[in-house]
Amino acid sequence: MSRLIATRRLASNLFVPRLATRTFCTDAPTKLNEVPSGSQFNKESKEDEGFMNDVPQHDIAIVGGGMVGMALACSLASMPLTKHLSIAIIDSNPALSNRPVIKKDDPPDPRVSTVTPATISLFKDIGAWEYVEQHRHAYFDKMQVWDYTGFGYTRYNARDADKDVLGCVVENKVLHKSLLSSLQNKDFNNTIYSTRLSSISLPTRSSVSSAGASVSSPSSKNLANLAKLDLSDGTSLYAKLVVGADGSKSRVRELAGIKTTGWNYSQSAVICTVEHPMENFCAWQRFLPAGPIALLPIGDNFSNIVWTMSPKDASNHKIMNEDDFVVAVNHALDSGYGPRPESRVFGGDVISSFFRPDVTSSAHERFEPPPKVVKLASDRMAFPLSLMHANQYVSKRVVLIGDAAHTVHPLAGQGVNMGYGDVSSLSNVIADGIAVGSDIGEVTLLKKYESDRKAANIAMMAVLDGFQKAYSVDFGPVNILRAAAFNGANVFAPLKKNIISYASGEFKLPFLS
Amino acid sequence: MFSRSLYQLQKVSRSSRLYRHDSSISSKHAVLAAFQSLLHNRPYAATPQPTVSVSSLNQTELAKFAAIADSWWDVEGPFKPLHVMNPTRLAFLRSTLCRYFGKDPFSAKPFEGLKFVDVGCGGGILSEPLARMGASVTGIDAVEKNIKIAQLHADLDPAASSIEYRCTTAENLVEEQMEFDAVIASEVIEHVADPAEFCKSLSALTVSNGATVISTINRSMRAYATAIVAAEYILHWLPKGTHEWSSFLTPEELVLTLQRASISVEEMAGFAFDPLTGQWSLTDDIGVNFIAFGTKKKSIV
C-alpha cells in the first residue's frame, strides 16, 4: 500500500488503462515539502500505522489502564487475529510506565477482588495468571452465608457445582501488575500515553458528505472518519475505536453523551485487612441489619473485610481506634447482633435443596463460627456504594467496558468479574470483525458486544443473593431466565431486602415479596 | 446438500427469462427515486455491451452524489439488509477462499497477493472488507453513480483506498483480457438479462484454477414469501420492485449454467435469518438465499 500522498481520478473515463494512473493533486507538492521526508516512514516506538500530518494513528485507543483496560490490551495481544493491531493506552498513572515490582512481604493492600473461575480462565488464556500465582493469592472452595437472626445458614462448597474452587481472592495491585508484565512481555504494538483524556471528536454524518464536496487532500479525508482524541498534555491521536475503561466516573462515557440509570445505595463500605491466629480457607458473609459483613481469605493468615453500613457509621468505624475496631469486627462476625444459627444436619440447607432436589454434601455440614480477628493489618478505607448501568454500551467508534458501563454492590464480589466478562466478549467481537474485514468502529459490529453483555450484566445485577448463586451464572441460562423478569432497575431496592430474608432460610422467592 | 440439489433437478424446469417487464413504480422520496433508477438500469441488457458513456463531472453532480452516498452506506437505510448480511457472506468467502488458496485463516490479511474482482460492486459494501483482508480488489459496476459513491466512501479508509473502482461491465473486462484469482458476483445475477452469457464472462475473467463465487436468491415459493412479500411489502426492508421473482435462479440452474462455462461448483451454502436475534448465519438450507463457490478447471462440458 503506497503511503505517498495521492489522489484518485474519479471513474470518469470510458477507457481506463490497465494500470490506473495516479496523479498528484495540485497542492500535494507543497504539503510534501512541509513534512520532512523521513518522518513518514519513521518507525520509532511511538509509531504505528503512519503519521499523517504528524498526528499518530492507532487502531484502538483504550482510555484507562486499570485492571479492565489492561486486560483488554492483553487479550487483544494474545489472539492471532488481533495481535497486529496498534493500541494506545491513555492513563496518567505512573505505575504503568515502570516495570512491575511487588515484594512478596509487602503488607496486604485492602483493595482486593474476588475473581471467579471464568475470570481465572481468561487470565490463563492471556498468560497473566502465572504472575498472580507467584504472589499473594488465595483460592477458596467453601463459603458460609448467614444472618443475624440466627434462623439459618447456607454453606456452599465448590463440590456442589462440581468445581474445584469457588474463586480466588487477589489484591488489585497484583492483578494489575500481572497484566502489565504480561503485556510488556508480548511482542505487541502498544503505546502508553501518560496523560489524561480531555476531549474526543467523533465523526459525524456531515463529515462523510463534506469529504465528497471538498477537494481537500486525501489524508484529511481519511482522518475525518476516525475519532480524534485530544489529551491534556496537548498531544492528539486518531483511533478507529475508543474504548472507555476509565471507571465509574467515565470521561469517555460523558463525552460520548451516554446516559446512565441507577441510584446511590444509602450505604458505604469499610474495607481493611485483618489477621487471624491461623489460616482461613473459607469465605464468610453475615448479613446484618444495616448490611452484610464479608470476610475473605487473601493468603497467609490475612483476610479482607468488606463491611457495608450506613455512611455515618462508616466514617465512625474508619476513625475509631484499632482495638475498638477489632472488637467491633468480632462482634459483627460472631458475637453480636443475634444468636448463632443452629446446625442443621439433614435437609437443613433450604436454599440449595429448593433448587437442587438431591441434597448436596454441604447441606450436611455444621455451622462453623468464623475465625477470630486478632489484629488490624492495614488502613481502613470507606467508600459510598451505588448501582449504575449505562443505557448503551456502544456509540459510533466508542465502546464502554467495566465500571464505566456498570457498577454494582460489592456484596457478591462480582463487579470486576463483570468487567472481565466484557473484556472477553469485546475482544472476541473485535476478532470476528477483523476476520471478515469490518471496520472495527462500526456500530453494527459493536452492537454484538452490547447485546451479548447487556443481558448478562443485567441478569447479574439482579442476582445478588450470595456468592454461589453469582458463580452459578456459569450455568447461565437458568439464572438469566429467572432474572430476566427483573427488567428494570426499579426492583433492585426491594430485592435487596428480600435477599436478607431469602438467605436466612425463609421461603421467600426473591421476586415475590 | 449438494447432492440433494441435484436430486431436485428433475422436478424443476422453468422457461427462459429473457424478457423483462419494466415496472414503473411511483415513489415520493427523491432518494428512493434515484434508487429505483439505479436498479432498473439493466446493466447487461444488451450483450456484448458497448463502452458506457459517462457525463462529465460538475459541482452539482458531486453534491448530488454526496447526498445519495449516505444511502448506500446508511446502515439503517434502504440497503440495510445487505449490510446486515454482509458479514455472513464474507465469512463464507473467507472460509472457502482461504481453504482453496491455502491461506492461513488466522491471519488478519489472508488474501494478500491475490487479485479479486467484485462484479456489480454497487457502493462497495463487499469490496471494502475484501480489501481490508489484504486482497487487491477491482470493483466494477455499470452504473456510474455507484462507482462514484463507492470511491467517496473508500477514500475514507486507507485500507480501502487501494480498491480500483471502474464503471464498466464484465464483458468489457473480458475484452481487455483481464484475469483475476477470484471473481465474485454477489446479489447480481438476479438482475442480469442473460445469466448464461454473464456466467461465461465471469468464467473468462477467472484465471485457470481460480475461483468464482456467486450469491443470489433461489426461485422458490419460500423465497417469494420471504424475499419479496415479507421483505418488500410487509417489513419494508427493500423498496418494492427490488427483485423480480421470475429472474431468480435455482441452485440447479446456477450449477448447470456455471458448468457450461467451465466452472465446477464445489461448495454451496445458504443464509438464514433469525428474526429473534436479527442476525444472519450460514446454513445448509439453500431454500432462499444461497451462495455458490466454484473453481475453474479445464473445460468440463
Image (cartoon, rainbow, N blue to C red):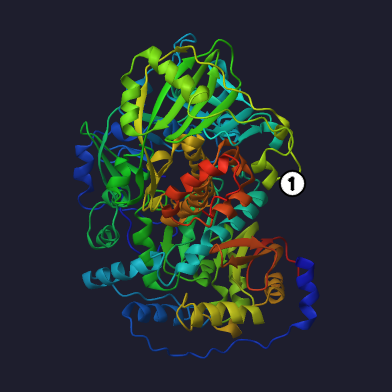
Q: Name the residue beneath numbered marker 1.
A: A357
Which amino acid type is shown beneath numbered disc 1?
A: Pro
Asked which quadrant contains residue B294, the reply is bottom right
- How many labels were placed on the picture? 1
Mark 1 neighbour density, 10 Å: few (under 14) some (14–19) many (20 or more):
few
In the picture, which quadrant includes the N terminus of chain B? bottom right
Residue sitting at 47 percent across and 39 percent down? A419
Q: Is residue A99 visible?
A: no
Residue sitting at 39 percent across and 77 percent down? B35
Q: Residue B193 location, x and y as percent? A: 55, 82
User: Disc 1: which chain?
Assistant: A
The front one of A193 and A163 is: A163
Asked which quadrant contains residue A154, the reply is top right
Q: Residue B298 location, x and y as percent? A: 73, 62
Q: Residue A268 location, x and y as percent? A: 36, 33
Q: Is residue B18 visible?
A: yes
Q: Secondary structure at mark 1?
A: loop
Q: Residue A11 location, x and y as percent? A: 36, 65
Residue sitting at 57 percent across and 74 percent down? B189
Question: In the figure, is residue A22 to the left or right of A414?
Answer: left
